[in-house]
Image (cartoon, rainbow, N blue to C red):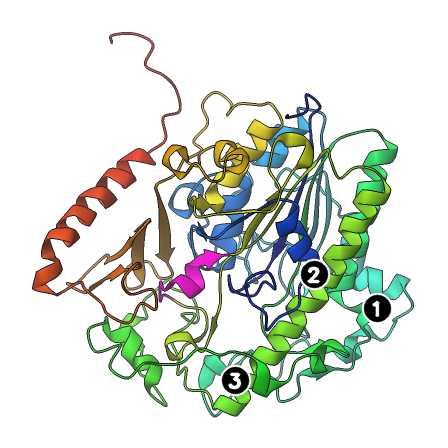
Amino acid sequence: MPSDRPPNILLITSDQQHFTALGTTNPAIKTPALDRLCNEGVRFDRAYCPNPTCTPTRASIITGMYPSMHGAWSLGTRLPESVPTVGDMLRTQGYDSTLVGKAHFQPLDETPEYPSIERQPLLRDLDFWRKFRGPWYGFDNVETSRMHSDESHVGGHYAIWMEEKGLSNWRDYFQPWPPPDANDKAAGGAGTYFLRDKRAWALPAEFHHTTWVAERTIANIEASAARQRPFFLWSSFFDPHPPYIIPEPWASMYKPEDVPIGAFTPGEFDKMPPHFGKTREVRPDYAAYREPNGGAAIHGFHSHLRDEAELRKDVACYYGMVSFMDQQIGRILDRLDAMRLADDTLIVFTSDHGHFIGQHGLIGKGPFHYEDVIRVPFIVRWPGGGVPKGRSSVAMQSLVDLTPTFLSAAGRAKPPGSMMQGVDLLPSWRAPEDTAAAPRDHVIVENRHNPTTVHLRTYVDARYKLTVYRAGDDGEMFDLLEDPGEVRNLWGEPSAAGIKQQLMLKMLQAEMVREPMPMPRISNA
């Protein structure tokens, strides 16, 4: 039975983790800690992000709003600090609110109108970060940085931690700032930026940011317990986002010849929008998609051709990154047990979006709304809150629902005037097999990576997926039951016209359903 005590809430996220990168469903990868969470809670196999890029989804996680509502509509934008967040609301309930790890609520540059602290050279101004701990986006305590792997954006509280641990020469292990050539390599342009010739990183694992996130997560849990306060803590890991580089022994944990990789099916792009086919070109021309105020690059709009041997090395490293993160998550779980906090702690593990590792011939991410990039791993454990053990479920989940669900778990309703669009998922967490009564029967995934030319929206229900673009006649429609590999686009097939019409109506109705209602109607006029 659910406890009357307000739970601790621990949100653990990875960055860009494919939904199959879990040992409990994929014997090729070892994730004992995440498998333990699955055995002690519920694994949801139909969970989706509201946008397959970092900033929009991360802002949705803490606001309960879609990117088109909260304002951080793309990478390179910022979440307005005036937007209410789950941390703001839980703080009024007596919670400690803490962020450890990746934030990415703001861009890597700024203007007078749109300032950002997540930018260079400020990231390496450690005097600034020694003084800055929040409040920020509803978090009373913030310990953050911004790099992935050995990127030059290293800094912030992570760099301070490395120095405190005795690694005064930490800069030697990371790419230099300013970078000699920020986004362009001669062979393939921006698409090669995240690739590394060596997957083994000389940085000792004890100084890796995965270790830092776990260590500081545990320290903040202990601090809240000492104050006898419930905590809302986002433990935000940076991996397995590329670049593909990780310390030993994780770099050699998996043999490239043993890891599964995706593949391109000849002809599968013949009926897809043009930007898919261009990924198969050596030097694709995406000039027609660029526009003012669109940013310096469009993620995913580059050649995705990758030598199979190199791709296997990438995936072996990617799996090593996941397993290292899993080891550190295990440390957090063990500490909760030792402190006797496990029963009263709601844990959600998920990722901000997915990742292509060869599926459809694609690598990384981009405006290609296959399951690989919009679907995410999703695990819930809450022994004292009525969440059963050892179950799996196909009840649909969206990351936009986390804020209202966390509020519900804490015994708080949406505040008056709220513009939240997410729904309370607690009923499906407590009764995961009752899909007929689940709060969701569909999800919406947005993607507005450019103001107009890369602007698409996807509707997914239990069987079908429909993607509509802002302009033009192109679109996508897949029968996920008959075609789980998504290789047959039904958008233009006459035999599927009736289903397409039904899905269009459902998608329009779904758009109306997610329209917020900030107050009830209290009079006739």
Residue 411 located left or right of residue 422: right
Sequence order check, earlier mark of 3 and 2 = 2
Q: Residues within 10 Å of mark 3 (few under 14, many from 20)?
A: some
Can you name the residue that lies furthest to the right here? 166
Residue 58 in picture, x, y percent from top left: 53, 50
Tell me the tag on residue 311: 3
Q: Residues within 10 Å of mark 1 (few under 14, many from 20)?
A: few
Which residue is depicted at the point 45% across and 69% down? 365
Quadrant of residue 231 within the rendered picture: top right
Mark 1 falls on what kind of element? helix
Which residue is depicted at the point 64% across and 62% down? 238
> Where is mark 1, residue-wise?
206
Residue 514 located left or right of residue 346: left
Magenta span includes 370: yes
Marks 1 and 2: which is nearer the front?
Answer: 2
Q: Which segment did they paint magenta?
A: 367-376
Q: Identify whether 5 is placed above or below 51.
A: above
Cα–Cα gap, marks 1 and 2? 20 Å
Q: Amino acid at mark 2?
A: Pro
Residue 164 in picture, x, y percent from top left: 90, 61
Q: Amino acid at mark 3?
A: Leu
Residue 463 in picture, x, y percent from top left: 29, 52
Which residue is depicted at the point 62% across and 57% down? 118
Residue 455 located left or right of residue 28: left
Residue 84 can be seen in this image: no
Cα–Cα gap, marks 3 and 1? 27 Å
> Where is mark 2, residue-wise?
32
Q: Amino acid at mark 1?
A: Glu
Which residue is depicted at the point 82% across and 60% down? 160
Sequence order check, earlier mark of 1 and 2 = 2
